[in-house]
Image (cartoon, rainbow, N blue to C red):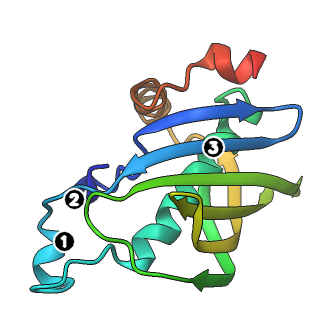
Amino acid sequence: MRLEYFQLIDRVVDINLTERRISCEATVPSVSTVFEGHFPGFPLMPGVLLIEAMAQTSGWLVSSINKFKRMSFLASVKEAKLRTFVLPGYVLNIESKLVHEGSGYAVLDAKVKNSGKPVCDATITLRVMEFPNEELAGEMLKMAARVGLTPEMALNG
């Protein structure tokens, strides 16, 4: 997890396109400038970054379903529940399941756990659209490879 770069997913653990679900993992760094202000003497992962981790996990699923021909952008977050603190060093399991896709949107149920215990959950809506340019499409494929998600996984998932 590289908080300062908004790279919140370390690796894709499992993806099943038939069941339209994905599981990712992320380790909260021990040290980050984010923790200098959130909070001095008691570092906590900001809730908004937990929501972003669910959105990124959901985005990897939607990109895979669309064979990396389309990308997604966070459109809305509904019924987000932050259930406990997340401390540096925690290993997070982030899961997402596609509930509905159509008319350029995807709706997913996402959740984060630490050691099997609920951390947060939300319904995430993503706007799904064509990549604005080839450069971004190429960079997204590189980022997918970094988290262990290859186009082959997406095609065979």
| Residue at the image point whose x is 58% and y is 66% from the top | 117
| Residue at the image point whose x is 32% and y is 49% from the top | 1
Residue bearing the label numbered 3: 23
Residue bearing the label numbered 1: 34
Q: Pointer 3 and pointer 1: residues touching (CB < 8 Å)?
A: no
Mark 3 or mark 2, whichever is nearer to me: 3
Q: In the rendered view, does 73 fall on the left or right side of 126?
A: left
Callout 3 crowding tier (Cα within 10 Å): few <14, some 14–19, many ≥20: many
| Residue at the image point whose x is 20% and y is 78% from the top | 43
Q: In the rendered view, does 28 fall on the left or right side of 66?
A: left
Q: Percent x, y for residue 141?
A: 48, 26
Classify mark 2: helix, strand or loop.
helix
The amino acid marked with disc number 1 is: Val
Q: Percent x, y for residue 72?
A: 62, 51
Quadrant in which the C terminus appears: top right
The answer to whether 7 is drawn above or below residue 157 in the figure is below
Q: Alpha carbon of mark 3 to alpha carbon of mark 2: how far? A: 23 Å
Classify mark 3: helix, strand or loop.
strand
The amino acid marked with disc number 3 is: Ser
Q: Percent x, y for residue 142?
A: 41, 25
Q: In the rendered view, does 10 fall on the left or right side of 14?
A: left
Q: Earlier in the sequence, mark 3 or mark 1?
A: 3
Mark 3 or mark 1, whichever is nearer to me: 3
Q: Alpha carbon of mark 3 to alpha carbon of mark 1: how far? A: 25 Å
Residue bearing the label numbered 2: 4
The answer to whether 156 is drawn above or below residue 30 in the figure is above
Classify mark 1: helix, strand or loop.
helix
Q: Pointer 2 and pointer 1: residues touching (CB < 8 Å)?
A: yes
Asked which quadrant contains residue 124, the reply is bottom right
